[in-house]
Image (cartoon, rainbow, N blue to C red):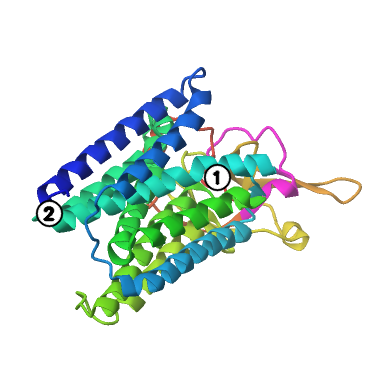
Amino acid sequence: MISRRNYGLTAFLLTGVAISATLFYRISSANSFLKGYCSFWYPLFWFGLALIVLYLPRPHLPARLRSGELFVGLALSCAAVFIFVQFLAGFLLKKIAASPYDLSPKGILINFRDLLPPIVGFELLRAYTIGAACRGSRYPHLWIILEALILGTMQLPFAKFAALQTSESLFIFLAKDLLPSLVQSGFLSILVYCGGVFPAILYRSVISIFLHIFPFLPSLPWIGDSVLGIAFPVFASLFIWEQYGYVTHRKIRGKPESLPQTAITLILCITSGWFVVGVFPVYPSVILTGSMEPDIKPGDVVLIEKIKTEQEIYSLSESDIINFKRGNIVITHRIIQILCDENGNLSFRTKGDNNDTEDPEVVYPNDIKGIVDHTVPKIGLPVLWLRGQRSIPEGVTDNETP
């Protein structure tokens, strides 16, 4: 039998082995020669680690056995809601793309081989560590938080981090990858603490399997992934914790209406994120250059009303400021001339107010995203600072949603 003191040492050793294997896997994956072997030995490693954890005498988790079915149902519900919200955002933004995964029977089996052992191994390790912290540590919550941070960090794309070159790419990495990974790891730790290891395995498996077998997937802008990846696990954590309080008859800190307040906060966070990425008829865009001075200055945010119909295109007039695509960039300039060919097809000449010459190419209706409705001064200065290290063509804004 393992003593209380040795539970912590065993958890420490298992975590250290997992960290070492993960680091070696990340390094090996970048090597063309070793990459082929990684897809074989890494799932096998987690399968072996899972067997070891199952074989070892395990400290009991705080979760009550009689509440197991409740938290299994809650985990399934959370997974379903997460998938629904993600796809809803994708449909509203018209950002649904074909799955990049191999959906042949052989490809699906390979995906399962690569996905399931790490998920099971990760969560069994998490459960063992939480049990060891609750049984043998004077500060269990501190160790649980530390383990959640470690396991969350282990799942980051280290190759992407190594390739970061600008403050903007660092900010996007923090918002899209690091924070969501840490927050989700925290949610999984709460789920294991309250309901045991199986609900956490089920939650991760349902989401991962669905996203690897469905033929179409949402392809959200990074800020949409960030808002959903942070806000949803926070809400789910508070929801699970409150349900745990009901089951165990523990007094949860906070007022009884804390869950509705949290729901409202989550809705506001997701709504704000959707507003930024362009779900609604009006969306914001940050001006990065001085091509439209003095009316619109760098760091100002323009609110743009979407143009979706042909009638709205024909209602545009000279002096309107439009937001349009030019290749991979987005430009906000003023219409100086409306052209119409013999077939009645429109095109537009544009120019930045502060530019000496008009734009070299005309703008066609399919390139127009919307018309500037209002300007909010200076609130986009943080984005301007983040973009400061990159060369930006005149008139480009940071918004790239349709």
Nearer to us in this view, 100 or 364? 100
On the picture, is 194 further left or further right than 218? Answer: left
**Callout 2 secondary element:** helix
The tag earlier along the polypeptide, 2 or 1, is 1
Q: Does 23 appear in magenta?
A: no
Q: Residue furthest left?
A: 138
Q: Which residue is mark 1?
A: 112
Q: Position of residue 317 (x, y in %)?
A: 70, 56
> Residue at the location (37% across, 36% down)?
170
Residue 152 appears in view = yes
Nearer to us in this view, 391 or 22? 22
Residue 389 appears in view = no
**Callout 1 secondary element:** helix
Label 2, label 1: how many angstroms apart (C-alpha)?
36 Å
Q: Position of residue 369 (x, y in %)?
A: 64, 52
Q: Residue furthest right?
A: 342
Q: Which residue is mark 2?
A: 136
On the picture, is 7 further left or further right than 276? Answer: left
Quarter of the image where one finds residue 161: top left
Q: Which residues are magenta?
A: 348-370
Residue type, label 1: Phe
Q: Position of residue 71 (x, y in %)?
A: 38, 69
Quarter of the image where one finds residue 202: bottom left
Q: Residues within 10 Å of mark 1 (few under 14, many from 20)?
A: some
Q: Position of residue 230 (x, y in %)?
A: 38, 56
Q: Which label sits on residue 22?
A: none
Residue type, label 2: Gly
